[in-house]
Image (cartoon, grey):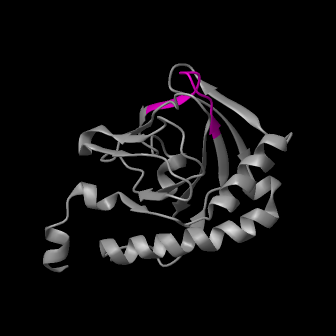
Amino acid sequence: MGTRLANQTLSDHVMVFDDTLTAAHCEALIARFEASADQEECRRDQCYSFAQLDITKNWPDEHKVLIPIFLNYFNKYQVSTNACFWPPKFSFEHLRLKRYLPGGQDSFELHVDVMGQMAARRFMTAIVYLNAPAGGETLFPNLDLTVAPEPGKFIAFPPLWLFPHAGLPPKAQPKYILHTYLCYPS
């Protein structure tokens, strides 16, 4: 395992890659989302609130374009973190596009992405921001780390209890993201 693993901190396992999608691609995804009748509202008490669309299910053409991009950056993550226990076979959870409305209407409170047996298949989280609203940062309070949204910015991290995070509300305009998980095979 060597000294590289011994010297890593938890913050080293939250990786950000810029310009993974063009601004034009991000804008086209947002426009297509807003024109779609396939959006669903997701709300759970005071924990989270947003609208989403399942790209895997509803936009197979876009799914086919986006998955190789996600794979490319997951591979860069794996190499950069020297993730020697990365499973040789894995699957994607459905790719979703999410919209968070401004003014405190929508957010995702502090949480982790594995909180039960069904979600325990997840071993990586990925978010791609599609725009740059004021606010809307992803906050990792235990790591003293905040990631501001910018079009095409990709963030990857483990979904486990060591990485609690929150999606802060955007201030004046909606925030749009792509979101998925890598999962262990069934």
* Residue range highlighted in magenta: 99-109
Q: Residue at x 63, y 59 (%)?
A: 23
Q: Residue at x 25, y 40 (%)?
A: 142
Residue 123 position within the rendered picture, expressed as x and y whole percent measured from the top left: 45, 59
Q: Residue at x 51, y 20 (%)?
A: 46
Residue 139 position within the rendered picture, expressed as x and y whole percent measured from the top left: 37, 40
Residue 36 vertical position relative to residue 74 in the rendered view, above or below: above
Residue situated in front as seen by the camera: 6 or 21: 21
Question: Can you say which quadrant of the picture contains the N terminus?
Answer: bottom left
Residue 88 vertical position relative to residue 160 in the rendered view, above or below: below
Residue situated in front as seen by the camera: 41 or 18: 18
Q: Residue at x 52, y 30 (%)?
A: 107
Residue 104 position within the rendered picture, expressed as x and y whole percent measured from the top left: 53, 21
Residue 169 vertical position relative to residue 144 in the rendered view, above or below: above
Instruction: Give residue 84's quadrant in the image.
Output: bottom left
Residue 86 position within the rendered picture, expressed as x and y whole percent measured from the top left: 41, 73
Q: Is residue 101 magenta?
A: yes
